[in-house]
Every structure is written in C-alpha cells, then in structure tokens.
Image: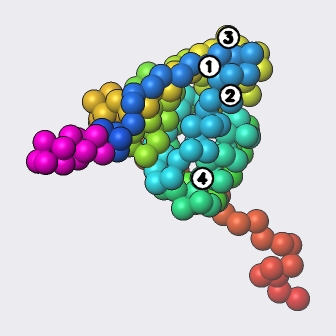
Amino acid sequence: MRCIALAALLGIASLSHAEPSVQVGFSPEGSARELVLRTIGDARHSIQMLAYAFQAPDIMQALVDARNRGVEVRVVIDKKRNQGKASKTAMDFVTRNGVELRTNDHFHIHHDKTIIVDGSTVETGSFNFAPSAETANSENVVVIRDMPEVARQYIAHWQSRWDLGKPYPAAPELQSPSRGATR
C-alpha cells in the first residue's frame, strides 16, 4: 500500500512541473512579432525586459496592457539608441502608464534584447523592439520555457543591468493653456 501511495505522490509531483519547451519565430515573416506579443501577453506576475531599440507601438501597448493586468513591468533600455522622437514617445507612453523604465549608458551599446516572464520564461534573440524588426529586418526570437537554470542566469544578468540603469522619469502631464493662467 505504501508503494502505491508513494507512486501516486510521485506521479502528482511530476504533473506539477511543466516540461521544458523552446519555440522560435522569425521576421519579417511575422512569427517573431507574434511570439514576442504572446510572451508578454502570457505574463501573470512579472516582466523584466532588456532592450536596445524601444519603439514598437504594439509592443509598448502590450507592456502597458500587462501592467494594467497587475503585472510588474520593469524595463532597461540603451540610453544612446533611444534619443529620437519614436523612442521618446514610447518611453513616455509606458512610464505614464506605470511601467518602470531605466536607461543604461554604462556600455558602448546596451545590445540585449530579452524578456523574462514570471521568472520562468525567457525570450531572446536578435529581434529589436522596433517596427523595422517586425516588418523589414531579418530577425529571430527564441522563447525558452521552464528551464530554471537558464532563467536564473538571465534574471541575474537583467538585475545587473537594472542596477546600472538610471530611472527614466514619467513625462509630465500636458496642461491645458487655461490651467494656471491669471486673468
């Protein structure tokens, strides 16, 4: 009887651990973008992102949507690469909507392109978070699920870059011309 109980317990324990899996996507064919958006959409607790280019409106919206679902979203981006209007618009949009954002200028370039979801899923590859990566460039994405040692190493790398980053302030709210005016 004890052997049956032990076997049943071991069977239940093995069901609670998901099998490791790896998925890949490519662009401009569209599967890379789809996989990035699905990875963000699957987040339940946390998203930790490292980015070189930070401009794609659909990815920015997905990050804000995750934040609105109660997911903690923290992002570190390359400071020098993200000085243009499209990047500033994206940065202001996500920070106004509760995403924590830091810029990193500690390296020649901060060239990471990684998303860690719920401490157990890692998305990485050449895919920049910019419209050109979605439609014009040849890019790749690899999503690794339920490989704790891989996730642990990416989390440690992310944390080191977060610690080096400087907080990006939320854009001030636009004021109407009549606000604060004296007559």
Q: Point out the residue furthest to the front here.
A: 1
What x and y, as percent, mark residue 131? 74, 28
Image quadrant containing the C terminus: bottom right
Relative horizontal placement of residue 120, taking residue 67 as reference (left or right): left
Label 1 packing within 10 angstroms: few (<14), some (14-19), many (20+): many
Distance, label 3 to label 1, CA atoms, is: 11 Å
Amino acid carrying label 1: it is: Gly
Find out whether residue 138 is within the magenta segment.
Answer: no
State the SS at label 1: strand
Amino acid carrying label 2: it is: Arg
Which of the two labelled residues, at mark 2 and mark 1, occupies the earlier sequence position? 1
Q: Which residue is mark 2?
A: 33
Label 3 packing within 10 angstroms: few (<14), some (14-19), many (20+): some
Residue extent of the magenta highlight: 1-12
Q: Which residue is mark 3?
A: 138
Of badges 4 and 3, the one in the foreground is: 4
The one nearer the camera, 43 or 146, is: 146
Q: Which residue is mark 1?
A: 25
Res 39 seen here: yes
Q: Which residue is mark 4?
A: 66
Which of the two labelled residues, at mark 4 and mark 3, occupies the earlier sequence position? 4
Distance, label 3 to label 2, CA atoms, is: 12 Å
